[in-house]
Amino acid sequence: MTQLQKYFLAILPPSDFLQQVHELKLKIREEFGIKYALKSPPHITLRMPYLYNELKEERMVGLINSFAKDYSPFSLQVKGTDQFRGRVIFLDILAGDDLFQMQKALRIFCKRNLNLKDELSDLSFHPHMTVAFRDIKKHQFQAVFDFVRKQDLAANFVVKSFFLLKHQNGIWEPKIEILLKK
């Protein structure tokens, strides 16, 4: 019997920066009552959420691990604040071709090996780390944006892995770490 579960694939920053971004999300909740972004850890989405048979989770993880063995760690930088269409506020990601090539290959891999359909945002990949979205009221958007920009969060780090996240009890939790092994 099929048991569909929600998953997605993402890069999580190192724990110290992850904590800084989480604390920013908590401040946004305190100041503005915006909390939807707290349902997931700070991350950079590589593959948008999808439904997959939970009974085949082990197989899926094995396939994704086989994909990752062909990729080497790479550097990226988190710097600046930006937004999408007045509805999403995020920390901007400055990355080289390594990230874009891996994400494109992962999208194709997921389509061929996991039978996942492309999402529009998978096709037009814009790496970012969301700090507020969905429950931002139009009238408060600029104030929240300015608040985030003033925090001036930034980091440089080497990406050595990405994660399979699973939706459990209303929140997204890192389930499996996938190491880049090349």
Image (cartoon, helix red, strand yellow):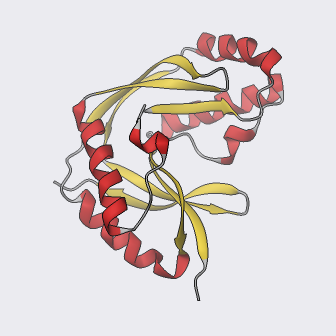
Q: Quadrant of the N terminus?
A: bottom right
Depth check: give the residue in front, 116 or 6: 116
Q: How many numbered callouts?
A: 0
Q: Quadrant of residue 87?
A: top right
Depth check: give the residue in front, 158 or 45: 45
Residue 127 horizontal side relative to residue 105, left or right: right
Depth check: give the residue in front, 4 or 163: 4
The image position of residue 80, as x and y in percent, is 48, 16
Q: Residue at x 54, y 14 (%)?
A: 152
The image position of residue 72, as x and y in percent, is 19, 47
Residue 75 horizontal side relative to residue 144, left or right: left
112 up-or-down from 58: above or below: above
Q: Residue at x 30, y 54 (%)?
A: 108
37 up-or-down from 1: above or below: above
Q: Quadrant of residue 30?
A: top right
Q: Quadrant of the C terminus?
A: bottom left
The image position of residue 41, as x and y in percent, is 58, 45
The image position of residue 156, as x and y in percent, is 36, 26
Q: Residue at x 69, y 14 (%)?
A: 147
Residue 89 horizontal side relative to residue 140, left or right: left
Residue 38 horizontal side relative to residue 165, left or right: right
Q: Quadrant of residue 21?
A: top right
- In the current view of this chain or complex, which residue is farthest to the bottom? 1
Q: Residue at x 27, y 45 (%)?
A: 102
